[in-house]
Structures are given as structure tokens and as C-alpha cells.
Image (spheres, rainbow, N blue to C red):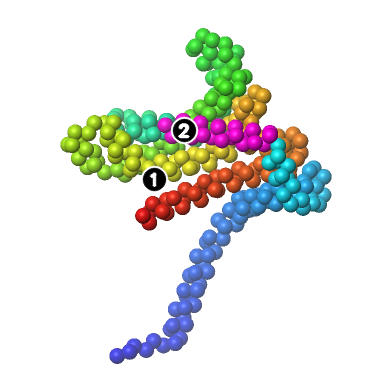
Amino acid sequence: MAITVPQQRVATGRAAARRTTTAEYLFVVPAVLFVGFTVLYPLGYNVVQSFQDVGIAQIVNGNAKFVGLDNYADQFGRPEFWKSFGISLLYTGGTVLATFVAGLALALFFHRDFPGRNVLRALLLLAWVLPTVVSANVWRWLLDGTYGLLNTVLGTEIFWLGKPGTAMVAVMLASAWSFAPFAMVLLLAGLQGISGTLYEAARIDGAGAWAQFRRITLPLLRPVSLTTVLLCFISTFKTFDTVFLMTQGGPGGATEVLPVYAYKLAFSFYKFDVAAVATTMLLVVPVVLSVFYFRSLRKEETA
């Protein structure tokens, strides 16, 4: 027997549903506006500037002329741009490698149960939460050639930040020191998700510690490891403050990563248009890597 629902009740139910949906959207509006004004608008404005002829006069008058791909052709034809791009990749690769190795070692260490583990883990996170201006100046003091702590301990007088090779290693270590606790947190969460019964079965089969790490830990930690590497790469590739505070891109441009190169173009030579090209590349490279990562992840899930 069919049940007849009064039309007025149905209409009232639909109106209530619409009111609920509208209220849900209204709660989201502040977050959307915040992201739009603080993230999307600056990014879009930067991309638009990379297609315009923008100097001090155009910034003041607001009459920038559209020049198409001329700024990109100018920068892609300059060896200085590609040198900074290569230095950025070298700095990012070295930092991510050091961050991942240190983070994995710390995660394996803190995965074990021992007294004071939580206190030590909290103390290590200080390196991550410290403001960059503080950590960079601490490292600059440690590596100072005249009164640095490292030279005092080693009994040498080496200007670590004044030589191209050591300066690059120094900024890598300083950045890795800041990012390693973050990597440790992610990798430790991944380790805690691996079932202990797998290790028990491996031990019963006679597998040693190295075999367990190679055959169980590394394969099962792969998704978390890829996420950690990707996030560290994105954070490191756009790093400006640590490098600028420690070396300002020197000596001789040895540590002039792409963000520092763009900063000098914009605020030393007031070439905002070509500086926008460099900062757009800072956006493009991580986005491309992220798309590649998520496509690979989706293929693995569907396989």
C-alpha cells in the first residue's frame, strides 16, 4: 500500500535542507576568502607580472604593458638564471637527502621504548619550531671563522661560510637541522603503523636486524617516505631566509638559490617582471612534482 506524503511537508523538508546547505557554505566562506586573498591572489598577481613590463614606474602608475613571453625568453637565455636554478636543485637535493637520513635515524631511535623518550622527542621538535632567523643566526655563529664554536672545538681558523664548497654544505646542514624533526614525526607515524607480528615472524625465520629493516621496514615505509621527501622538497626549494641570513647568496654566488636570485632582481635592480619569472618557476617545479607523485600513488592504489 503506497504511503502518501503531504506536499506541504515535502516542501518544508526541502526548504530546511536548503537552509542547512546554505549555512554550511557560509561557514566555509571565511576560509575561502582568507586563502583567496593571502594565497591565490598573490600567486595570480605574480604570474600576471611575469607577462608584463614592470619596473618602479609601472608599479606606481599601474600602467604595466603586456609583453607576452619576452620576460621568459630573457631569463631562459641568461646563464645566471640557470646557474641559480642548478644551485637550487643542488641545495634542495642535498638538504632533502640529509633531512630524510637524519629523520629516519631519529624515527628508528624513538620507535624504541626507553625512559625519557617523550621528553627527548619534544626537545628535538624545538629545532623545527624555532624561528628561522634564530636558527640561521645560531648556525652562522657556530661557523664563524673568527669566533665560531666549531673552530674553537677543532682548533682551526676556517671561514666555513666564506668558501664556496663549505658554504653550500653549511646551508644544507642548517636547513636539514630544521627540517629533520618534521621528517622524524612523519616517519615515526609510519613506523608505528607497521604490525609487530611481521617482525616476530621474520625473527622466527631467522632474519637479522638488517634483513628486517631492508625487507619489512623500508618497503612498508615507502608511501610515508615519498610523502616526506615531497614535502621536504617543496619546503626546501622555496627556502629564502636560511640561505640569505647565512650567506646572502655568496661567496661569489655559490649559494645563490633561485629565491635569493629573484629577491636581488626585484629589490636590488627593481626588475619585478623578470623576478616574477624566477618566482613562477618556484611554483611550477613543486607543482609538477606533486602531480607526478599523486599520479604514481593513484596507479599503485589501483594496481
- Left or right of residue 121, residue 136 in this image: right
Name the image quarter holding the C terminus.
Answer: bottom left
Q: Give the residues in magenta.
A: 79-101
In the current view of this chain or complex, which residue is farthest to the front?
77
* Residue 237, numbered label: none
Kind of residue indicated by mark 2? Leu
In the current view of this chain or complex, which residue is farthest to the top?
155
Q: Position of residue 217 (x, y in %)?
A: 31, 38
Q: Name the residue tied to disc 1.
A: 223
Task: Using the image as rendered, state which of residue 69 and residue 236 is in the foreground.
Answer: 69
Other residues around mark 2 within 10 Å, as few (<14) / some (14–19) / many (≥20) = some
In the current view of this chain or complex, which residue is farthest to the bottom?
1
Task: Using the image as rendered, state which of residue 130 and residue 273 is in the foreground.
Answer: 273
Q: Earlier in the sequence, mark 1 or mark 2?
A: 2
Q: Residue at x 24, y 31 (%)?
A: 208
Q: Is residue 128 highlighted in magenta?
A: no
Task: Using the image as rendered, state which of residue 144 and residue 123 is in the foreground.
Answer: 144
| Residue 214 visible in rendering | yes
- Left or right of residue 284, residue 123 in this image: left
Q: Position of residue 293 (x, y in %)?
A: 47, 48
Kind of residue indicated by mark 1? Pro
Question: In the figure, residue 131 lies in which quadrant?
Answer: top right
Callout 1: helix, strand or loop? helix
Q: Is residue 80 highlighted in magenta?
A: yes
Q: Residue at x 44, y 83 (%)?
A: 10
| Residue 245 visible in rendering | no
- Left or right of residue 69, residue 139 in this image: left
Q: Position of residue 289 (x, y in %)?
A: 52, 46
Q: CA distance from mark 1 to mark 2?
A: 16 Å
Q: Name the residue tied to disc 2.
A: 97
Q: Residue at x 65, y 52 (%)?
A: 44
Q: Position of residue 255 (x, y in %)?
A: 61, 28
